[in-house]
Amino acid sequence: MNSFAAGAFAGALVLQLGPCSSATEADRLLETLARCLMKRRSKIVLGASVTMLGVLAFLGWCVYRANFVGKTQFDTALYQAASTTTQAAPFSYDGYAATLNAYVDDKGMVNYRKMTEDHKNLNDFLIAMAHLDFKAYQSWDEKAQIAFWINAYNALTLKVIIDHYPIKAGLLSGLVYPANSIRGIPEVWDKFQFLVMGKKMTLNEIEHGVLRGQNKDLVERYGRFYEPRIHVALVCAAMSCPALRNEPFVGDKLDEQLIGQTRRFVSNSTRFRITRDPGKVYLSSIFKWFGEDFVTGYKPDIGFAVGGSDAETATLHFVSGYLPAADAEFLKAGEYSIKYLKYDWTLNELKTAAAEPR
C-alpha cells in the first residue's frame, strides 16, 4: 500500500471513529490503523504469491507443450539396422528372455541401473520384433499372438524406462506423482513410437488397440482377442502394476502363466484384500479402470457385490476363482462394500539399484 493510499485510509478511519478525546483513544486509533494496514499487507503478499504460482504454472505448461505435446518420439538410431537388414534367423524370444533373467528378480523388481549399462539383448529383441514377418505372425495360433503382444508391451516399456533413467519428475508431474515414476515421462503411452512388424506403434495402440480390441483397423490387421487376464500381465513399470515375470510369455504355456500371474496378483494385499468385520473388499484400481473387460466372460448369474455394477460383479467373480474356498464364498455372498486401492506409480525398481548421483 503506498503512502497516499495509507493516508487516505487513515483519514477515513478517523472520520468513522470521530475525534480522539484522550490519549487512550488516540492509541486505540493507531493500533486499529496498524492492524488494518497489516491485514491489507498480508492480503497483498498472499495475492502476489498466488499470482506468481499461477505464472510459474503457466510457463511450465508452455514449456511442456513446446517440447512434448503433439510431438512423437522415435529411436531412429536403434531401427536403422531394421531398415537396412533382413532377419535371417527365425523370430525368437531369446534376447528378451536373457534380459528378464539378468535384470528381473523373483518378485518382479527390475534392476534398471544395471540394464542401462548393458541392454544389447533387449535391443536385439526389439529389432527382432521390428523385423518379424507379418505372414509368420499370421501363422501363429491365438495364444501365441496374445503372448507376443504382452511381451512387446513389457519389453518396450523397459526400453522407455532405461532411455530416461534416472527419471526426473517434471514441473507438473512432480506435484502429482512420485519423483521416480513412468508418469514423469510426458505422453509415454501415446507419443513414443516403436517398430513392430515394420509398422510404427505406440504402447496404447498395443494395449488398447490390439489386445483390448478398441482400434478397428488394428483388429482387422492383427486379429480380435478376448483375454482380460492381460491386465495381470501387462506391466507399466509401477509398484501397483502386476509383477514383471522373469520369463517371456509363450503360446503353449500362456494359460498356465496367466493363472500364475493372477494368483500372484490377488495374493498381494496391496492389490486385493478382504476385511470381514466390517465387510469390505479392497480391489486394485486396475479393476476399476478395466472392469468392463471382464463382463463378457465372467458376469455371474447371481451373487457378488449386491447392488454393484456389472463390471464389479464380473471382476469379483473372476477373482473368486483364484482364492481359497472361504474367501470365494464370502465374495459370492455379496454382503460387503467395495473400495479401490490407491495406485502406487513409484518405479518398480530394485532398492539396491537406486539411481546414483550424476
Image (tube, rainbow, N blue to C red):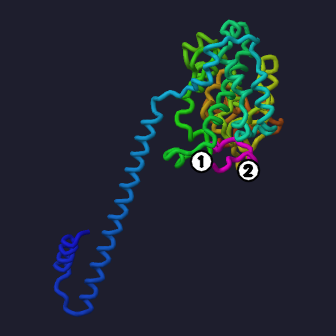
On screen, residue 136 above or below 151? above
Where residue 168 sits, quadrant-wise, is top right
The reply, left or right, for residue 305 in relation to residue 8 is: right
Q: Main secondary structure of the magenta part?
A: loop
Q: Please state which of residues 131 and 295 is positioned toward the viewer in this rendering.
A: 131
Residue 277's disc number: 2
Question: In x, y percent, where is residue 253?
Answer: 81, 20
Q: Which residues are magenta?
A: 340-358
Find residue 179 and name its label: 1
Q: Which-is-in-front pick, marks 2 and 1?
A: 1
Work out whether residue 339 can be spotted.
no
Q: Nearer the viewer, residue 271 or 56?
A: 56
Residue 150, picture quadrant? top right
Can you see residue 249? yes
> Which amino acid, mark 1?
Ala
Q: Any magenta on residue 345?
A: yes
Q: Earlier in the sequence, mark 2 or mark 1?
A: 1
Q: Is residue 20 left or right of residue 164?
A: left
Pick whichever, 325 or 14, lies toward us: 14
Q: Is residue 176 above or below residue 94?
A: below
Q: Position of residue 239 (x, y in %)?
A: 68, 42
Asked if marks 2 and 1 touch (Cβ < 8 Å), the reply is no
